[in-house]
Amino acid sequence: MANKEWPLYEVFIRSKQGLSHKHVGSLRAADEQMAIDNARDVYTRRSEGISIWVVESNSVFASDPNDADSLYEPSNSKVYRHPTFYDVPDGIEHM
Amino acid sequence: MKEHNIEVLERDFQAKIDNDIKIEPKDWMPDEYRQTLIRQISQHAHSEVVGMLPEGNWITRAPNLRRKAVLLAKVQDEAGHGLYLYSAAETLGADREQTIDDLHSGKAKYSSIFNYPTLSWADMGAVGWLVDGAAIMNQVPLCRCSYGPYARAMVRVCKEESFHQRQGFEIMTTLAQGTAEQKAMAQDALNRFWWPALMMFGPPDEDSKHTKQSMDWKIKRHTNDELRQMMVDITVPQAELIGLTIPDPDLKWNKEKGGYDFGEINWDEFWQVVKGNGPCNKDRIETRRKAKENGAWVREAANAFAEKRKLRNTKKAS
């Protein structure tokens, strides 16, 4: 058991009430509670956060960068999804 | 993979770098780029970790509570910086245990500055002022490094490290304004750390075999000699301001180049220390090895406790 490598955890911190948790880095720990404790010591020493999430890195399933074109290219041609696509006559306000 | 495919991949990769688009862990990258980064990031991580030792030496003997709290906070930061960097190396596929074992076996290097002893309290001042000063000079451009995780780790490190240099300079200033003995102590620390601090930027450009490729890959943004010159130009006026003398008889302002000319660096000494023959090389590695061995029972206990907690939680749930 001594040589068992601790799992890697991804650490997310909410910097203040009203903001979402943001990925800040990763660390190794024996379990989730220890990951939280270590994240507190490493990532919030200067009041960077008020809430911590840890997720075992193995549980993160990520998209493949090679699929980037097929995944994100289609939205490039759909400029009509942005408000700047539309002509608004002069004199119209608050739209 | 077919050969022309590799060519296309390499071309696309370099195009990204040339356009200042960051490389992220899952992106394709040439194997040498990966290996260069693993070597550099793990060496950097080791330097943070070994760098705790010369300062740890003085924590129990800090002259007052304020200095002690500051030094503790600084050393704790270095541990955190080691962690950020080991994690960044892991995103490239480096194995954490193996990386640390490579340090302990002597296979991996770390900054040779940490193989010099810290003989007096003034050394805490010199280390913060000069060693952290040189480290910051190196690390600020690394915040724009082409590899995303390394660049992000550097942003955190630089933000946290800005107090490290100031606290060192504060120690030097206080001593320099103190009694004759205190001022002599500060001068002695400067005398011993000045040249090793300039060596921290690595061998001169003509002898630095990795510089050209690292600059093309935007891992490095300035050459060793450029950074060294910046360090000298910034530091000399700081020493003058607090009445200390840079231990270099050849130091003089060169109006034409807008910087200082400075004396020859003893590169024999540098290579001797890199090869393991510095004053503290053996001691540093021995301390690291013992720390790992003596901490084994703690890691074992943490595993046992994690198991127990898991069991308890499943029982509660059922």
Image (cartoon, coloured by chain):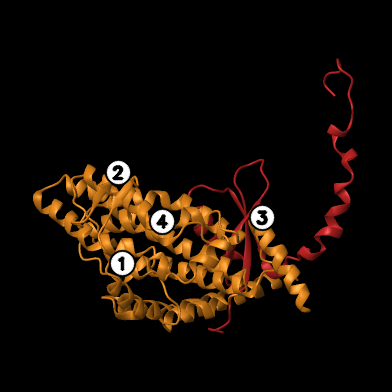
The colour one sees for chain B in the rendered image is orange
The disc at residue B255 is 2
How far apart are the two marked residues, 2 and 1, measured between alpha carbons? 38 Å
How far apart are the two marked residues, 1 and 3, measured between alpha carbons? 38 Å
Where is residue B311? Give x, y as percent: 66, 75
Amino acid type, residue under disc 1 in the picture: Pro
Residue tagged 1: B54
Chain-order first, disc 1 or disc 3:
3
Amino acid type, residue under disc 4 in the picture: Glu
Callout 4 secondary element: helix
Where is residue B254? Give x, y as percent: 28, 47
Report the front residue among B287 and B110: B110
Residue tagged 4: B226
Chain-order first, disc 1 or disc 4:
1
Callout 2 secondary element: loop
Left or right for B294, reference B61: right
Marks 4,3: beta carbons within 8 A:
no
Report the front residue among B34 and B14: B14
Quadrant where the C terminus of chain B sits is: bottom right
| Outermost residue, left side | B180
Amino acid type, residue under disc 3 in the picture: Ile
Residue tagged 3: B21
Count of marks, rendered view: 4
Q: Mark 3 lies on which chain?
A: B
How far apart are the two marked residues, 4 and 3, measured between alpha carbons? 25 Å
Amino acid type, residue under disc 2 in the picture: Lys
The colour one sees for chain A in the rendered image is red
Can residue B244 be spotted in the picture?
Answer: yes
